[in-house]
Image: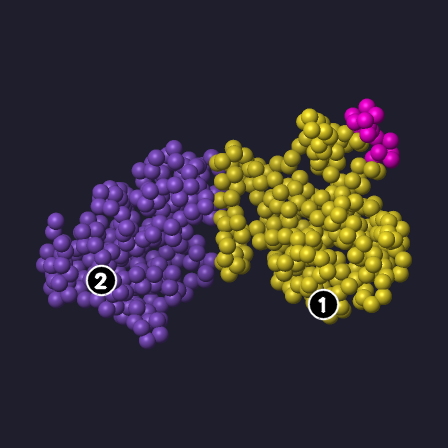
Amino acid sequence: MSALLRVEDLTKSYGRQRGCTDVSFELWPGEVLAIVGESGSGKTTLLNCCAGRLEPTGGKVLYETRHKGLIDIHDMSEPERRFLMRTDWAFVHQNPRDGLRMNVSAGANVGERLMAVGARNYGNIREAALDWLSRTEVDPDRIDDLPTTFSGGMQQRLQIARNLVSGPRLVFMDEPTGGLDVSVQARLLDMLRDLVDRLGLSAVVVTHDLAVARMLSTRLMVMQQGRVVETGLTDRVLDDPQHAYTQLLVSSVLQP
Amino acid sequence: MRDDTIPGEAAPAPESGYNFAYLDEGAKRMIRRAILKAVAVPGYQVPFASREMPMPYGWGTGGIQVTASILKPEDTLKVIDQGSDDTTNAVSIRRFFAKTAGVATTEKTEEADIIQTRHRIPEKPLSEDQIIVLQVPIPEPLRWLEPREVETRRMHALSDYGVMHVKLYEDISRHGRITTSYDYPVMVNGRHIMAPSPTPKFDNPKMGDMPALQLFGAGREKRIYAIPPHTEVKSLDFEDHPFSIQTWEEPCALCGAEGVFMDEVILDDEGDSMFVCSDSDFCQRRRDAGHTGPAAEGGEI
């Protein structure tokens, strides 16, 4: 078995500003990797570079494609990359409005990826949309409603349905539970963990919430000022933090 | 005022002080280059330096510029507005070219060398030596779903058109069928998705494999695109909701024609109406040939 995603010495700078510096890691099939760190530590920059949404300044992002083996996604042609992004990959934004088409119905949102890769049978598209709405616990009766009429939690679940409908192998999530209240967050996490488990997805999850990392991920990467300061199994890092910053981070969590 | 634009008659000498067909030769050459490029890449929207024309945007400034640059002194011009030869837009454009170019004008489809039209293709099939020029308000078929020009251009470049079906999906999910009835998106030559200007979808099948050259001009949006003769044009659809054109239950009230595009004409304020051919030349010629419809037989008209 080989790694699904291999990142080598990834660096991204915005002029003199450093986004992330010399990050390397491997993601294995079925593994969920969480990236934690404070605001401005380069988590989202790293995620965007890995997901092909930002051009890195240096380093490589290699992805194990289904047919051509390990390829640097930034060397791919744009049509190839676009195709990959809407079939093999998924990207869940923190704000569902960034990931959804707000002016078309929930069903069309879920069906878009299918239509983009050539599905031309309305009945089948609708069936898939209904199936995914129920799998993400959105009431199937709302299939023809606009996402603007949905609550925040429903919008986020709809965004997840829209992403998973194409059967991706790798999911990128940027603060998937940000901006949701704790009970909705808990339900969403439960659902995500279940889906990731059942579909055998690999995922890279960016979060600043250590509880989310604990719940979803198998491995954890701690970032500070654009560098990875500690990495290891999630339980090990959270229960026995080695780096001073990780210790600070873990001890800063409020207990109700 | 002297009406010097009676169709079918050769117009008198053009007004002095204008270059032939209003535009200067440099501008016409620029537009012809855009047209050549458009013909070379069927369905691709070629940007061009649209000129100010002596009429407002929305009155066909794009179509007029295209017509002006392909017009020759010996050509005969026909102008249609919503199928009709005698509505405001058609009359003013016909008068414009009669005055500035001195070309002959006609209402008869087969006599015309160039047909400039707003939103209809004549019922009578066009031939290889004719050119049809369509006026386009919004040339970008993806605009409804993607407001960013940079992004729509990239979508065209990469043939990334999945989103177009999202619009049709929305139609079916809301109304049970595809309700888009005009400006119905088409795939040209298997490569570019194109807005056929707001022609009714009834005319979409005519665009495919048409012997005449079809040119599209959008003046405000500064785009020209084309369908060369005998090019494949396919209306988008779903397997289980195939493309279909409008049909009418009754024949034309005046000429009895069936299977043509009809306008509903309100007759009084008691809900009475009749359906007549939208193509006024087609209807008139049928009546001249002795065909009559229900209203004409009843002696009401």
Residue A139: mark: none
Residue B27: mark: 1
Can residue A113 be seen here? The reply is: no
- Residue A158 percent location from the top left of the image: 36, 43
Residue A38: mark: 2
Report helix, strand or loop for mark 1. Answer: helix
Report helix, strand or loop for mark 2. Answer: loop
- Residue B95 percent location from the top left of the image: 81, 54
Q: Given the image, what chain letter belongs to the residue carrying mark 2?
A: A
Separation of marks 1 and 2 at Cα, in angstroms: 59 Å
Indicate left or right for B113 with B32 as reference.
right
| Identity of the residue furthest to the bottom in this view | A16
Amino acid marked by disc 2: Glu
Amino acid marked by disc 1: Ala
The local crowd at label 2, few if under 14, some if 14 to 19, many if 20 or more residues have their Cα within 10 Å, is some
- Which residue is at the front of the view, A137 or B5? B5
- Which residue is at the front of the view, A11 or A201? A11
A167 part of magenta stretch: no
**Which quadrant of the view contains residue B84?**
top right
Question: Which chain is in purple here?
Answer: A
Can residue B219 be seen here? The reply is: yes
| Identity of the residue furthest to the top in this view | B298
| Identity of the residue furthest to the left in this view | A240
Q: Given the image, what chain letter belongs to the residue carrying mark 1?
A: B
Question: Which chain is in yellow here?
Answer: B
Please identify the quadrant where the N terminus of chain A is shown: bottom left
Query: Relative to A157, is B33 above or below?
Result: below
Residue occupying image coordinates x 81% and y 26%: B300
**Tags 1 and 2 touching, CB below 8 Å:** no
Which residues lie in the magenta part?
B286-301
